[in-house]
Image (cartoon, rainbow, N blue to C red):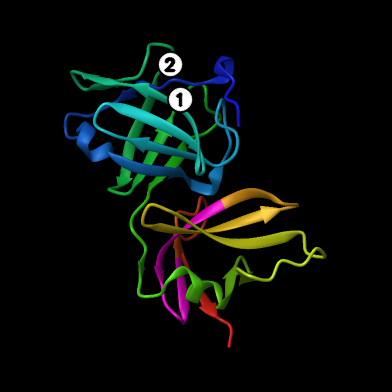
Amino acid sequence: MKFIDSYFVFFIFLLSTSITAQELEGKWIVSGNKSFGGFPGIHLMEVSEDSLSHYNFDQFVTKTAYQTEDNKLKIDTLAFADFSFKNPNRLSISSERLEQPIDYIRLVPTKTDLNAAKIKQKKYNLERGGKNFEIDFQNHPDSKIMHSYLKKIDETYFLVIHRYGNPITAVPIEKITADKLHLYGFMAGPEKLVAKAIE
């Protein structure tokens, strides 16, 4: 997808003295996959030692260098954003340019003894908000509006939901067994949910 520079939002994250750039290193995905500013789609951000890379899920969008100055992480000079860790793997960002704070979830390797082919053979049921959602990674009939797909970035598996053929959300999976999917990184409600296998 072509990135439109005029909509890109640069951040200067204000760091407390107890936070180092190394604590930010890794890949992060927006909780709830909320689109905002210059990041349409499913925003995933990779923080390395000297650069930030932005993705629309697994599609590269742009990359920029950054540097630390005193207690600040500087990424250009166009905007400021405060950020804090809710826990070591959940980062909250707020700014005048954002309607409300946005949380990022650190991606961690999925724990599983199953390969992708075995996982896709299973069906799971997820109960959330009093409703049941069937997760079927293989059956995608034209009559259904919503479809579930199993995707992987590095060592992290995702439950990716497509609507009318377009990905609308990607939920990282913490652990996969033959009986359960352990999902995490939700925007509202419990941060973690468990989907149970359908016999």
At 45% from the left edge and 81% from the top edge, which residue is drawn?
178
x%, y% of residue 79?
A: 43, 16
- Identity of the amino acid at label 1? Ser
Residue 187, magenta (yes or no): no
The number of callouts visible is 2
Query: Which mark is in front, 2 or 1?
Result: 2
x%, y% of residue 129?
A: 61, 65
Left or right: 181 in relation to 143: left
Query: Mark 2 to mark 1: distance in Å?
Result: 8 Å
Q: Over which residues does the magenta segment extend?
A: 170-182
Residue 73: image quadrant is: top left
- Identity of the amino acid at label 2? Ala
Residue 19: image quadrant is: top left
At 33% from the left edge and 55% from the top edge, which residue is drawn?
108
x%, y% of residue 50?
A: 26, 26
At 57% from the left edge and 24% from the top edge, which residue is drawn?
3
Pick whichever, 128 or 67, lies toward us: 67
The disc at residue 79 is: 2
The disc at residue 44 is: none
Residue 178, magenta (yes or no): yes
SS assignment at label 1: loop
Q: Is residue 146 visible?
A: yes
x%, y% of residue 171?
A: 51, 56
Left or right: 80 in relation to 49: right
Q: Residue at label 1? A: 95
